[in-house]
Image (tube, rainbow, N blue to C red):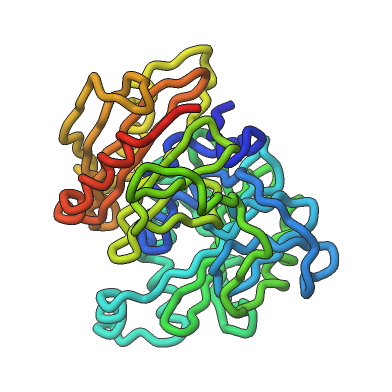
Amino acid sequence: MQKIQGSSPSQNGRLSLGRESWTVKKRVSSRLLLLLCLALTLTCVSCATKEYGVPDGMKNATAAGAEFRLYVPSVWNVSTAYGVSGAYFTMTQQSTVSAVKYPVSEELETQMAALDLKGSARLSWFWEQECKPAVEAIALGGSVTAVEEETTATTLGTLNAQRYHLTATVKGETLHVVHVLAEKANAFYVITFTVADDLYATLVSHIESILTNFIFAEAYVPSTYVKPIDPDADAPEGMKLASNGDVAYRFYVPTDWTVNGDEAIYAAYLESDRTNVSVVPYMPDADSMSVAEFFALCEDMMKSTADEDGYELLKTETEQDLGGRLATAYTYRYTVGGRDFYYKQVVAAYKSCIYSMTYTAASAELFDAHLADFERMVDAFEFR
């Protein structure tokens, strides 16, 4: 079983490799987010304690900052460590739920206005443009089928909503994908259930309970950070520590970068344009894996999820250094939903893991503008 290590060795699961390369940020295109929520099983577990207002028999599966509360049955496993509200029922079969807010961009509003869409017609259009294509993109051709009796009007919280139910064959497995959409304050809210066929009947009542107990609320503030970091730790001049003792490295970032303590990934970003850098270890299934073999797997993932001709390897630099280990740096363009993202991924092997330090920018200009900061982070990086 492939494993990505989070803030502690116990946070392992079926999450596909290289997820940091497609960091799940709210400002990344909605098509990419929907695709990842479908294609990846969210199994980095976040601690869930009983909180005031949580319905009996449920637990809170809401990520920090979400303007709603996603509650799941207590037998589910909360998975909010990567900044997405969600949970899974079992690690052995596909059985996930996620809830995501997608702000309506000016471009999207213009398109809907040109079609004179109102009310439920806006929800249907968004589902046809974003949700359904995300399923089709990873499913066996011709296998996506609508379950007509479950394409219905419903409610979500106090809002009118639309519910859509598809089945699809993905990597030889039949999956049920249920989307429930509502619109509030110039944003679409999408709850996505992705469940294996032979588990779906068992979880139907769970799905109904999750939807019944969903509410809109003020932005959620967890009682504790996922990964506390010492703000006074020693660091190179002009930098600060962005990791803690739970991982086998020390990751430093410039002091003007922001570290998010509410996600399990050790990462930092610039408030001005969301350029970000993350460090994630990958534990291979095999006894050994080379850096080149690891990146080949990353490339396969990117090619399968990018737009047509949406992946381009721009540069490969061998004989690099990462924390005193021989590393390779890969620079590439990844395009999804018509948006270009530029990456530099520095990869090295250390002990039993492959470590990937990934720099992401939303344009070539931003990539060049902050590249010097990234090089400082690479130079300061240490293995412990």
Where residue 323 appears, x then y in whole percent? 38, 27
Can you say whether 275 is above or below 343 in the image? below
Q: Dividing the picture into quarters, in which one does residue 208 lie?
A: bottom right
Using the image as rendered, state which of residue 7 and residue 30 is in the foreground.
7
Q: Residue at x 77, y 75 (%)?
A: 53
Query: Which of 261 and 116 lies nearest the eye of the viewer?
Result: 261
Answer whether residue 164 is visible to the viewer in this image.
no
Q: Position of residue 147 (x, y in %)?
A: 56, 59
- Please count the marks in the image: 0
x and y percent of residue 244 in the render? 55, 42
The N terminus lies in which quarter of the figure? top right
Residue drawn at point x = 64 percent, y = 47 percent:
95
In this rendering, the answer to whether 338 lies above or below 12 is: below
366 up-or-down from 92: above or below: below
On screen, residue 308 versus residue 383, left or right, reads: left
In the picture, measured across the screen, residue 170 lies left or right of residue 10, that is left
**Residue 270 in view (yes/no):** yes
Where residue 215 sits, quadrant-wise, is bottom right
In the figure, is residue 296 to the left or right of 181? left
Tell me: residue 228, above or below residue 91: below
**Residue found 30% across the figure and 34% down from its top:** 379
Residue 309, quarter of the rendered image:
top left
Query: Residue 69 placed where, x, y %?
Result: 65, 71
Viewer-proximal residue among 282 and 149: 282
- Please name the residue shown 47% across and 82% down the image: 120
Q: In the image as oriented, which residue stretches furthest toward the right? A: 56
